[in-house]
Image (cartoon, rainbow, N blue to C red):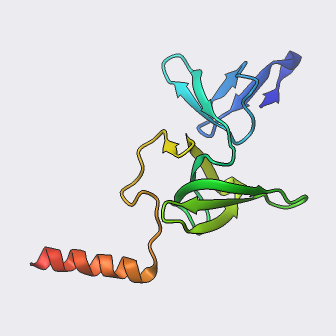
Amino acid sequence: MQFGDKGIPYLNTYDGRTIRYPDPLIRANDTIKIDLETNKITNFIKFDVGNVVMVIGGRNRGRVGIIKNREKHKGSFETIHIQDATGHDFATRLGNVFTIGKGTKPWVSLPKGKGIKLSIIKEARKHIATAVALTA
């Protein structure tokens, strides 16, 4: 949230919208739900430990998990530690993470793999199984 002329609070969204007079509880990295007809905020999710996030950048792009820890490094990037549904832990930069739900319940439908990254061997076995199923 920022302050404009004459101290009017506003926030900017990723899609270029500017919303004036938002809820004062909304902070940077929180996710907001907007009514597109009225351009008003209907709900928001705090960027806190325990919420569901999707990784939108870096090597772990597309993975979904729950925030376990947030490391703040002065003069450098903040690191977010995440645990996916299979129990695997991974870490990424704060700028690569987007909150998609409160607690363990996402607000959006998840992609086909539910945001779980398979190992190279499991992925190869999956491709072989689909190829065999198509030829049979």
x and y, in percent, of residue 81 in the image:
68, 61
Q: In this view, does 48 lie to the left or right of 51?
A: right
Q: Is residue 10 left or right of residue 83?
A: right
Classify residue 118 by image quadrant. bottom left
Q: Residue at x 67, y 37 (%)?
A: 46
Q: Is residue 85 left or right of residue 121?
A: right
x and y, in percent, of residue 47 in the image:
68, 43
Q: Which residue is drawn at 45% across and 41% down?
A: 108
Residue reaching furthest right?
A: 74
x and y, in percent, of residue 60 in the image:
57, 66
Q: Which residue is drawn at 77% across and 31% down?
A: 1
The quadrant of the rendering that contains the C terminus is bottom left
Q: In this view, does 95 lie to the left or right of 121?
A: right
Is residue 16 shown above or below 50?
above
Residue 55 visible in image: no
Which of the two residues, 114 or 28, is positioned nearer the viewer here?
A: 114
x and y, in percent, of residue 84 in the image:
53, 61
Residue 30 visible in image: yes
Is residue 3 shown above or below 81?
above
